[in-house]
Amino acid sequence: MVLQGKTALVTGGSSGIGLAAARMLRDNGARVAITGRSGEKLAHAVAELGGDVLAIEADVSSLEELRLANGKIRETFGSLDILFANAGVALGTPLATTDEATYHRIMDVNVKGVFFTVQAMLPLMREAGSIVLNTSWLNQVGTPGRAILSASKAAVRSFARTMSAELLDRKIRVNAVSPGSIETPIHRGSNQSEEEFRSYADRVGTQVPLGRMGRPEEIAAAVLFLASDASSYMLGAEIVVDGGRSEL
Ligand SMILES: NC(=O)c1ccc[n+]([C@@H]2O[C@H](COP(=O)([O-])OP(=O)(O)OC[C@H]3O[C@@H](n4cnc5c(N)ncnc54)[C@H](OP(=O)(O)O)[C@@H]3O)[C@@H](O)[C@H]2O)c1
């Protein structure tokens, strides 16, 4: 229970990595709030987590909704010790065919959303708090058809450094976690059967030195470490959890 007495916000906590992180932070003693756009997904997540979380409908690309989320957290928790800025989208963006709307959709959530999430929650953050940003192994690797997604995640990687430098006086540490290919709904097509997804996951697994996609809990474990005092000497840094894909 390394987070006993602490409070945490996980954006995009209704699914995938965010949901696994919310569970792990909660199971380690933190009071946890989660956000997402869909009320239905949030309700499912709350049920899965056993009801013991504060669920807030809020789109990270809307400054007004972030302001309202701040109000709800202030009302319920009073302050925050931990922020996991996790909400994000992943869309292919081939150079030849990507339109402007897709560019804005990715940048609005992945870059603007992270920047203004931190800005909106900072007044609630206690001294010596921990902010964890979710980037991606793609922030340092060139893969075709992913220029905008990869650039958005490189911007988030950079935020961990600049925000840490800016928040030194408040002793708030900002670090990043970089997942590889993790089995979450972000990889699922809307009409994809379980069998089709398994065959996709197996194909991706062959590109990973460990031979499989990762599990959301394997990212949540890194988030727990960065959120806790166990990582007290880390700031502006990145933990890559990608089965060796970007290193071997
Ligand atoms: N899975 C991977 O392989 C992988 C690899 C590298 C990085 N990541 C990063 O990990 C993060 C989580 O992804 P995931 O794989 O866990 O995907 P996921 O299962 O699709 O979860 C995404 C979460 O973000 C929320 N969300 C999306 N857009 C939002 C917005 N505008 N405002 C607020 N919440 C929003 C979603 O809820 P609503 O749809 O209801 O809003 C959902 O809770 C993302 O930043 C992603 O880029 C994932």
Image: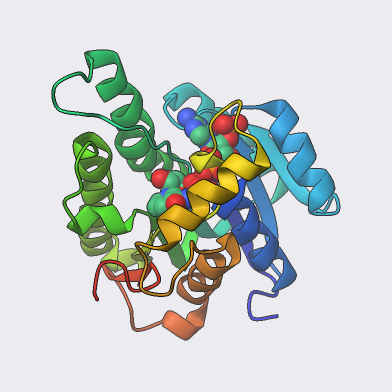
x then y, percent, for residue 146: 24, 39
80 with respect to 158 (left or right): right
Q: Which of 209/175 is in front?
A: 209
> Residue 12, can we see it?
no
Q: Nearer the viewer, residue 48 or 111?
A: 48
Residue shown at 39% from the left, 55% from the top? 133
Q: Quadrant of residue 107?
A: top left
Residue 111, picture quadrant: top left
- Asked if residue 1 is positioned above or below residue 47 in the image, the reply reads below
Q: How is the image coloured?
A: rainbow
The answer to whether residue 16 is left or right of residue 93 is: right
Residue at the spot 25% in from the left edge and 24% down from the top edge? 103
Above or below, comparing residue 51 to residue 92 in the picture: below
Residue 131 visible, this angle: yes
Q: How many marks?
A: 0
Image quadrant in which the C terminus is located: bottom left
Q: Nearer the viewer, residue 1 or 64?
A: 1
**Location of residue 130 in the rendering, given as x and y in whole percent from the top left corner:** 45, 66
Quarter that holds the N terminus? bottom right
Residue drawn at the location 48% of the way across and 42% of the way down: 87
Q: Is residue 193 left or right of residue 137?
A: right
Position of residue 96 measured from the top left corner of the image (x, y, whole percent): 14, 21
In the rendered structure, the answer to whether residue 27 lies left or right of residue 195 reads: right
**Residue drawn at (71%, 40%) of the image:** 55
- Residue 200 lies, in percent from the top left, at 49, 47
